[in-house]
Image: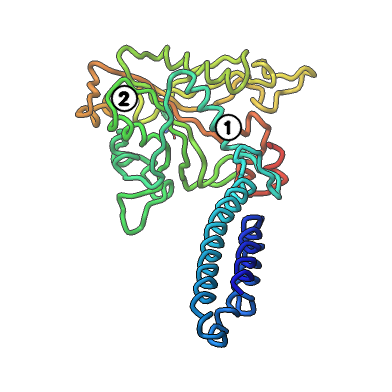
Amino acid sequence: MISRIAEIRSEAAAAIAAAGSSEELEGLRVRYLGRKAELPGVLRKISELPPEERGKVGGAANRARKELEELLGARAESLDASELDSKLAGDRLDVTLPGAPPHPVGHAHLVARTQRTIEDAMVGMGYTVAEGPEIEHDYYNFTALNHPPGHPARQLQDTFYVQSHPEVLLRTHTSPMQVRAMETQPPPIFVVVPGKVYRRDSDATHSPMFHQMEALAIAEGITLADLKGTLLTLARALFGETREVRLRPHYFPFTEPSVEVDVSCFQCEGTGALPDGSRCNICKGQGWIEILGAGMVDPNVLGFVEQYGYDAERVQGFAYGLGIERVAMLRHGVPDLRRFFDNDLRMLEQFA
Ligand code: PHE
């Protein structure tokens, strides 16, 4: 009996050492130590042995069982570890691989792309990009921009107010960010501000919501000539290297002097006529296309930010505000501004 126990023990020990997986190991546990296995059977039947053999056989069988349990435990641990290693190696994810989306990737909306083109041109001239709130205070939208109390833009028929808060409105232009930007940093400041603006307007060239790009430059010694040079660079980036700009006198409450800015027509090269002699349809025969409003920042506006370091006797500068949809319409021949917001894929996919 003793020798049989030794035989089982060495056979089992060899099998355990050779086991190649935890599954196989579990099979060996059942085979050598399970309820129907031989060694536990010996232990169960100790009482049937003659009394003088019980101690020896029981001792040998118990030692063998304990030893096999230990061998099984140790082997299980090392198998688990190597199985985990190979599982981890097999599951490794290469996050640098390109994705495989089930649907083709989309593209930026033409308005967003136009916005970025303008930003790129301005960033190239040293400007930073900032954004501001679309729900704005009367103070920033009008008061600090030098709008007198009776200014028509303040009227209900032109501006969306918040009913419960008469001093809060949807901004009618991005110009309020001129004041907000100056409140956050002293001069010199060179900033552009893209964003949505809202007016009670709707026709082929007006939508109640549209996008503007504001620019503000304040430093010592900035002149109207700097404004014109900046606009020329921008116009050429947007409409081609042979463009010219021209300034016409205008009025805005927050700039003095104020100008409207035209760019020479990119279709007829400013002649107003097409090669066949017919009238250019883009500039309506004018040779010039109006693209934005601008001017030298009114010292009264700087008065509202004097405590932030803007001394109108020391610094001055310019601002402009441009309609992003208008630029996109001109560059791509889009006939109706409202098409940008219909979300018709046939329209949007033309500008992929
Ligand atoms: N905010 C003006 C508008 O929306 C445009 C503008 C901006 C004019 C900056 C001058 C300077 O019409």
Please provide percent x and percent y for residue 329.
Answer: 63, 34
**Disc marking residue 129:** none
Please provide percent x and percent y for residue 147.
Answer: 32, 36
From the viewer's perspective, is residue 37 above or below residue 102? below
From the viewer's perspective, is residue 110 above or below residue 167? above
Mark 2 C-beta to ligand 1 under 8 Å: no
Q: Residue at x 45, y 30 (%)?
A: 321
Residue 17: quadrant of the picture: bottom right
**Disc marking residue 114:** 1
Mark 2 touches mark 1? (CB < 8 Å): no
**Disc marking residue 298:** 2
Q: Residue at x 31, y 20 (%)?
A: 188
Instruction: Find numbered disc 2 in the image and state the secondary structure of the residue it sits on.
Output: loop
Q: Nearer the viewer, residue 271 or 34?
A: 34
Q: Nearer the viewer, residue 284 or 220?
A: 220
From the viewer's perspective, is residue 352 above or below residue 18? above
Q: How many residues crowd mark 2 within 10 Å: few (<14), some (14–19), many (20+)?
A: many
Q: How many residues crowd mark 1 within 10 Å: few (<14), some (14–19), many (20+)?
A: many
Please provide percent x and percent y for residue 159.
Answer: 41, 47
Residue found at the far left of this picture: 307
Mark 1 C-beta to ligand 1 under 8 Å: no
Q: Nearer the viewer, residue 39 or 210?
A: 39
Residue type highlighted by circle 2: Asp
Does the rendering let one see residue 257? no
Query: Could you tell me how far apart the alpha carbons at marks 2 and 1 are, in whole angstroms?
Result: 29 Å
Instruction: Find numbered disc 1 in the image and state the secondary structure of the residue it sits on.
Output: helix
Q: In this image, 8 relative to 199: left or right?
A: right
Please provide percent x and percent y for residue 98.
Answer: 66, 39
Residue type highlighted by circle 1: Thr
Residue 313: quadrant of the picture: top left
Q: Residue at x 54, y 67 (%)?
A: 64
Residue found at the far right of this picture: 276
